[in-house]
Image (cartoon, helix red, strand yellow):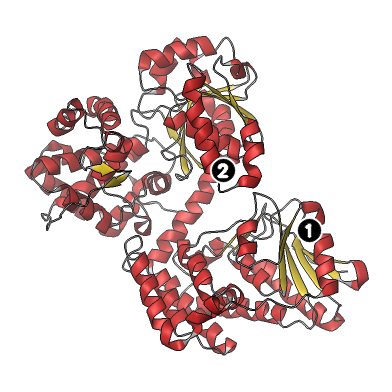
Amino acid sequence: MNNWRHWRLVTGEGGNLELYLEVADRSVNVLHSGVLDELEEVLEYLYTESPPGVILGSDPERAFAMGADVTEFTKLEGRSQALAMLHRGQKLFEDWANLDCPTIAAIRGHCLGGGLELALACDYRIAESSPQVQIGLPEVRLGIHPGYGGSVRLPALVGDMKALRMMVTGKAVSGTQALKLKLVDAVVPRRQLYPTAREILRSRPTGRRLSWRDRVPRVPALRNTVAWAYARGIRSVAPKEHYPAPYRLLKHWQGMSEDSTTALESEAQSVADLFETPQSRQLTRVFLLRQELNSQASDREGVSSVHVVGAGVMGGDIAIWCALNGLRVTLQDMGSEQIAPVIRRARRLLDRRPEDTRAVLDRLIPDPEGHGAEAADLVIEAIFENLGAKQELYRRLQSRMRPDALLASNTSSLPLERLAQTLDDPSRLIGIHFFNPVSKMPLVEVISHDPGQQPLIGRAAGFVRRIRRVPLIVKSSPGFLVNRVLMPYLLEAVRLREEGLPVATIDHVATAFGMPMGPLKLADMVGLDICLAAGSTLAEAQGVEIPKTLTEIVEAGHLGRKTGRGFYRWKNGEVKRLRSRKPSRDCEDRLILSMVREAVHCLHEGLVERADWIDAGLILGIGFAPFTGGPLALVRRRSTEAVCRRLEELEKRCGPRFAPGPGWDSEHLHKTVS
């Protein structure tokens, strides 16, 4: 019926047309300018032909739509181009909404950003009953908010409070959650997706009215109160000076007109303003870097079975996460009593996903004897940080594993070349380093210690992508990248405490800068014994001293949250609030520049391939203030000369740990992704 590259139109039952998005030049469906060019032609055809109904779907092997092509955002030259792009998208989606015939979106997999905005322009929406379905408007994570009509249509569909929650947080919902929100009209198995869509077009059910609770925020007198309450609620996690997008969204919603043309223009003007902010530019850059890291995976389907040795907190959570993501997992420890808490933890996690409980628990297999190592595609060692114990385990494992299976350590600080010495083939061992908590931290370091390991590293990165995590390929070094940069920050916080600065003040300085959590609270949560062990390994390699306070507090048995006392007092997993006071002028620089300095050294030593990947790794691995673009982007913004001068000042007052060191004149430091 047409010669379009990205859209396929076929005639279905009863003369209804079925329009499938199949973006030709991408592995996923994204709404780039070429796709929108053809959508304009599609609309001209539909207006001419006037079919009885249209089903909007995607190629059977693809998700519905991942949203706009973010790379095109980086090519916008000024506010006028951004506004033109927004106006065009709005007009196309408005034309779709104004079709004379009924329309329905059949959603598989991800339906995000502009993809959801297009689905919102349909009369009906249905979703596949699959764990892969994710529906949301995540634009705030790029420093903007919905700009193709989403901020106008979503509140009208599900109610203002529910819509604001989705847009302000950027969090996606599952198909089941979308049904509860009345965002979709049905959730059905894959085989019933299109038959159900055809039946809805035939029966044309009437729309559901919003409840009185959902309509209350539309009362003009209440809008100011709702917007104020939302802004107050997000201030602690997303300060306005760091993340302006949610506040601009609230302002736009607060003054939104009942007239759709006026409301859409307000949306476009607001988003165009946000495109101009430095925060949006940096958050967009981080998004693209995340995609770049994901592209390192060579084979996402190469690992289907995993054997995990060590059922502690980290090993257990790795096993649960792998099982949740469809892999067969065997979990080994000294006995069933060590494994039982992991199964209980998995059940608690699955309370929120009861439809998946049986399948996930069937894939998570207790294996005290370790028989699973013989058949697994990947064996992950996650026992305690002891060189001898790990080496002895590898010696036993190598004779049981398949020759082609991957052997990986989850060590957080021990160099792989030392760990591998006990193996007949030392190049067999790689690192796959998860961060705690596994279910929330997106980054996984994939570590090599031998140039010949590249095929293994590509497979390991593929496994990381298979379980919906972001792989960062790092060369072996004490602490690798993330912990190596994190540890000077934690130790400097302990030194500031030794100097008499209150715990709450130190942590407040870090969170005010943009860190997700203060260093001393983070140390308590990780465990001060673990911090001391990892810090000692790194301190030996870097020639620095461990603060006496850290050693003394661990020797006293105060290990942080797990013992109820560390730098804070803990009760039921929460800390007792402490008083803060005005910090010294040096406090922020001592904390933040300790990380910046170490990041530059890691770049100089070639731990990762590109400077940009250091920024991405530290944002995803420790939450280094995302709106800054990362520690090396911070250097570029402040200038190398200014940062080095500040380090030299701190060196004079605090000692050689702040000496700038090598790497500051590297041309790689100043190369960045466009």
Q: Quick check: 451 left or right of 603?
A: right
Determine whether 400 is above or below 366 in the image. above
Q: Is residue 100 above or below residue 540?
A: below
Residue 601 visible in this rendered orientation of the protein: no
Residue highlighted by disc 2: 350
The residue carrying mark 1 is 193
| Residue sitting farthest toward the right | 14
The residue shown at (67%, 69%) is 119
Mark 2 vs mark 1: in front:
2
Quarter that holds the N terminus? bottom right
Residue 568 shows up from this direction: yes
| Among the two numbered marks 2 and 1 on one chain, the one whose residue lies closer to the N terminus | 1
* The quadrant where residue 95 appears: bottom right
Q: Is residue 152 above or below residue 232?
A: below
Task: From the viewer's side, name the closer residue of 285 and 158.
Answer: 158
Q: Callout 2, which amino acid?
A: Leu
The amino acid on which the numbered mark 1 sits, given as a three-letter code, is: Leu
Residue 176 horizontal/vertical position (percent): 64, 57
Q: Residue at x 61, y 79 (%)?
A: 90
- For label 1, the SS is helix
Does residue 225 appear left or right of residue 197 in this picture? left
